[in-house]
């Protein structure tokens, strides 16, 4: 499991490879906060290579969303598979996030 | 075919993913519903192990978590027990209420109840038993609404 960070224009794109769970959530948080402190304001987290997310992973996304908003930034999520969408719907977090079906749609929405 | 396992895990979050993968593979071996293994079982077990290590055992590296699993093609029973003082599951708030939705925590037990068919705690509150049945049509458990 790893987090690959890249830039496309002014958007910071983070690929979540593997699981986003209690064991690695802090690593994602750290990477996003470093970018935020460095001036980045547009974030896209891409889940196309993600197996599953647990409640800690969902919690860290909620926390990051709040911190990004506090800095007048924007967060988009993209490429959630059926299982991940189910988790967001069960927890009603689909109402809290801007979820795009793919990366192109997410980038166009900023 | 049925398989029974007892795992004694160190109180180390790094052990969670490996343990979940191992037992998910055993579930596949007995022929359990692959859709329910992939989402319901993996997430439910991950939540139970994380709760046991973080809140039950309070991150104490000297404590352990015991996992007992009984796997058949139609039903999986899995018990996770920590060495903590236990908790009252009735006090857990509903994370889907608008006021709670923006809080980072509180979704673990909620997801377990949603994703498993039956969930029981022992009287002390340091042991959770989760039962998941094979079902090919739906993934979340509608009766847990």
Image (spheres, coloured by chain):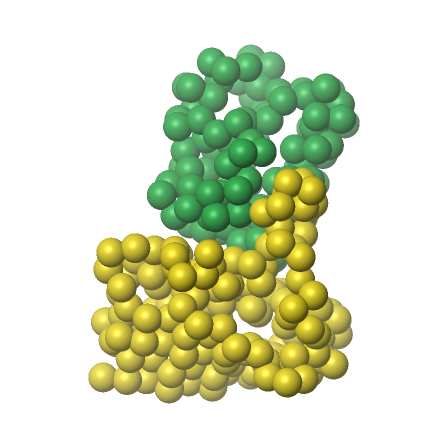
Q: How many labels, in total?
A: 0
Percent from the top left, x then y, of residue A58?
A: 58, 46
| The chain in green | A
Percent from the top left, x then y, of residue A106?
A: 47, 21
Percent from the top left, x then y, of residue B117?
A: 40, 68
**Residue B55 vs residue B1: left or right?**
right
**Residue A53 vs residue B100: left or right?**
left
| The chain in yellow | B
Q: Tell me if residue B43 can be seen.
A: no
> The N terminus of chain B lies in which quarter of the figure?
bottom left
Q: Tell me if residue B45 can be seen.
A: yes
> Residue at 47% of width from left, 83% of height from top?
B68
Q: For residue A5, which quarter of the picture?
A: top right
Percent from the top left, x then y, of residue B102?
A: 67, 40
**Residue B60 vs residue B15: left or right?**
right
The image shows residue B62, relative to residue A23, as above or below, that is below
> Residue at 44% of width from left, 72% of height from top?
B118
Looking at the picture, tell me which residue is in the foreground, A6 or B103: B103
> Residue at 30% of width from left, 55% of height from top?
B138
> Residue at 59% of width from left, 26% of height from top?
A75
């Amino acid at each position: 499991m790893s987090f690959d960070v890249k830039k496309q224009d002014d958007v910071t794109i983070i690929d979540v490879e593997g699981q986003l769970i209690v064991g690695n959530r802090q690593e994602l948080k750290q990477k996003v906060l470093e970018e935020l402190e460095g001036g980045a304001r547009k974030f896209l987290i891409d889940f196309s290579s993600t197996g599953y997310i647990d409640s800690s992973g969902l919690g860290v996304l909620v926390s990051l969303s709040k911190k990004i908003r506090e800095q007048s930034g924007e967060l988009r999520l993209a490429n959630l598979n059926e299982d991940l969408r189910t988790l967001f719907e069960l927890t009603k977090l689909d109402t809290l996030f801007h979820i795009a079906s793919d990366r192109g749609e997410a980038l166009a929405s900023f | 075919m049925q398989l029974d396992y007892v795992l004694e895990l160190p109180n180390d979050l790094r052990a969670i993913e490996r343990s979940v993968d191992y037992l998910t593979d055993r579930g596949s071996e007995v022929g359990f519903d692959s859709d329910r293994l992939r989402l319901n079982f993996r997430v439910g077990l991950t939540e139970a192990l994380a709760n046991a290590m973080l809140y039950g055992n309070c991150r104490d590296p000297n404590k352990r978590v015991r996992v007992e699993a009984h796997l058949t093609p139609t039903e999986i029973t899995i018990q996770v027990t920590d060495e903590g003082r236990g908790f009252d599951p009735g006090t857990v708030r509903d994370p889907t209420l608008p006021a709670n939705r923006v809080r980072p925590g509180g979704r673990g037990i909620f997801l377990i109840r949603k994703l498993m068919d039956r969930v029981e705690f022992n009287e002390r509150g340091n042991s959770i038993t989760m039962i998941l049945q094979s079902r090919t049509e739906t993934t979340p458990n509608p009766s847990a609404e």
